[in-house]
Image (cartoon, helix red, strand yellow):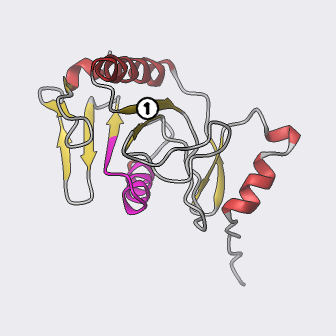
């Protein structure tokens, strides 16, 4: 008996499908050639999102280093990924981008907040993709465990509630106690 292989689709085919009238209001991502729909987050995810976004937003008001974006699609031409990070920071040092299309490069910082149905492996796989294709830093937030994993191209650190998260070279001067990121 032969096993069926999943058919991986390209970003171009993904764009065609995502732009169909019945899909325009859906949050679709392309992950490793497979279309995934971002599910409606639970309140905990929303609280964590809000806390992180507000902290970074206040920091960037005082330190205008780039753009803070919420749930915006990024893609690398020729790849089979078109992810939507929960929060993204695009540095002013990165190329300009269109406001009506997916951003054709990875953000300087991608932030993912784990949903209850999302595995640790899915989180780290996504982080690996961001880093492989140009992100300088990824923050993975695990609300149920009150942990933050910080990944860069050369380092990986797991921070507990008692430790401090910093912005590294991309957000110099930013810091927050990990416990303040979770309700």
**For the N terminus, which image quadrant?**
bottom right
In the image, residue 90 lies in the stretch drawn in magenta:
no
**In the rendered image of this protein, does residue 113 appear above or below residue 121?**
above
Per the image, label 1 sits on a secondary structure element best described as strand
Tell which of 165 and 46 is nearer to you: 165
**For the C terminus, which image quadrant?**
top left
Tell which of 100 and 110 is nearer to you: 100
Residue at 68% in and 78% down: 3
Disc 1: which residue: 67
In the image, residue 123 lies in the stretch drawn in magenta:
yes
**Which image quadrant for residue 32?**
bottom right
Residue at 27% in and 24% down: 63
Q: Which residues are magenta?
A: 121-139
Residue extending farthest to the right is: 21
Residue 171 pos. (x, y %): 25, 35
Residue 175 pos. (x, y %): 18, 27
Residue 153 pos. (x, y %): 27, 59
**Which image quadrant for residue 37?**
top right
Residue 113 pos. (x, y %): 41, 34
Residue at 61% in and 34% down: 39
Residue at 39% in and 63% down: 132
In the image, 124: left or right of 78?
left
Of helix, strand and loop, which mostly describes the magenta segment?
Answer: helix
The number of numbered discs placed on residues in the rendered structure image is: 1
**In the rendered image of this protein, does residue 157 appear above or below residue 154?**
above
Q: Residues within 10 Å of mark 1 (few under 14, many from 20)?
A: some
**In the rendered image of this protein, does residue 13 appear above or below residue 66?**
below
**Which image quadrant for residue 71?**
top right
């Amino acid at each position: 008996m032969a096993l069926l292989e999943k058919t991986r689709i390209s970003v171009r085919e993904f764009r065609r499908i995502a732009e169909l009238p019945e899909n325009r209001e859906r949050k679709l991502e392309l992950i490793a050639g497979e279309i995934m729909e971002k599910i409606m987050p639970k309140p905990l995810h929303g609280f964590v999102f809000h806390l992180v976004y507000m902290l970074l937003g206040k920091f960037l008001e005082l330190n205008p280093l780039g753009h803070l974006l919420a749930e915006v699609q990024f893609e690398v031409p020729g790849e089979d990924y078109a992810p939507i990070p929960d929060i993204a920071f695009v540095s002013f040092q990165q190329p300009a981008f269109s406001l009506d299309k997916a951003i054709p490069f990875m953000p300087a910082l991608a932030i993912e907040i784990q949903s209850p149905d999302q595995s640790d492996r899915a989180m780290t796989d996504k982080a690996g993709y961001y880093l492989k294709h140009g992100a300088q830093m990824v923050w993975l937030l695990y609300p149920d465990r009150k942990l933050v994993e910080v990944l860069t191209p050369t380092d990986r650190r797991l921070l507990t509630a008692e430790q401090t998260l910093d912005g590294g070279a991309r957000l110099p001067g930013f810091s927050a106690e990990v416990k303040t990121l979770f309700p």
